[in-house]
Image (cartoon, grey):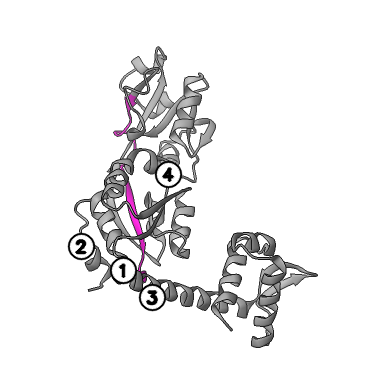
Amino acid sequence: MNLIQLRYIREIVRQNLSVSQAAEALHTSQSGVSRQIQLLEEELKLQIFQRNGKRLVGISEPGKIILNLAEQALREMENIKRVGEEFTQKDKGTLTIATTHTQARYFLPVAVKQFMQIYPDVALAIHQGNPTQVAEQVVSGEADLGIATESISSYEKLLCLPCYQWNRCIVAPEGHPLLNDVPLTLEKIVRYPLITYDFAFTGGSLVKRVFNQAGLEPNVVLTAIDADVIKTYVNLGLGIGLLASMAYDRERDVNLGMLDASHLFPASTTYLGLRRDAFLRDYVYNFIHILVPKLNRKAVCSALKVG
């Protein structure tokens, strides 16, 4: 048994049991991956994966235990590597952030710019997805930090620290009758085709719950995970938009009018998620502090219960 074999079985699971895609992601051959899995199974005298012919179709019960232990072993190896880098390459390394489009577009830029000026030798990568994808990338170790709304706080393996609260607004093309029909109410919103976030995304379930509690059903004609896409289709006259207030810029969105909707919906909280067992490089603590000034190293360590 070796670390290469553990990496291979982990990557196969990440690639939905596709050996060819795992081999591509690992920059090796499909036959090499298959051979190493076969050797590992022979050594353990059991099957990690269920098969239909040569195709992998599932994970065996002992395989699930092995994969969990393999994940733990590989994470600890990564932590050991980070400790070494922290003392030999203080200001060099990588920082991977998983986040939603809205956070990447409207919340992160100032902090990212400042961080890159302080740490020019740290390669920074931003992976975008919905909150579930964000959380899973941090849990798996693919990302160092996750930044998203409430749903990531339900993951036990993550420590989630609140960043800030936000609410929503309605946008519509200039001249739209709703813009002059104040005060804004849920009843008025449901009169028009609605373009908003996917209801499984960015507080969408909260929005749907508010309409349901009022006994109303919005006429959702289009959903997207990208606030700029929502505004594009609102500009085309396909409906009114319901989106995060921070995504509306009066100077940039000159063809759109905006109505505040914070009195209709509870505020949502954006969280920063960390793996509870991850070793964080010094520059990761500094990025967190730049992003959320109240979260200095002492505060984060206290929450993580580390020295």
Mark nearest the camera among 1 and 4 is 1
Q: Which mark is residue 202?
A: 4
- Residue reaching furthest to the right: 53
Instruction: Identify the amino acid type marked 1.
Output: Glu
Residue at the disc numbered 1: 86
- Read off the magenta span: 259-278
The numbered dot on residue 175 is: none
Taking the view exactly as shown, the residue that stands out farthest to the top is 175
Q: Which residue is painted at 30% across and 60% down in the image?
A: 91
Residue located beneath label 2 in the image: 299
> Mark 1 or 2, which is nearer the eye?
1
The amino acid beneath tag 4 is Thr
Q: Nearer the viewer, residue 265 or 127?
A: 127
Disc 1 and disc 4: Cα gap in Å?
Answer: 35 Å
Please tell me whether mark 2 sits on a helix, a strand or a loop: helix
> Is tag 3's residue or tag 1's residue first in the polypeptide sequence?
3
Say whether residue 197 is magenta.
no
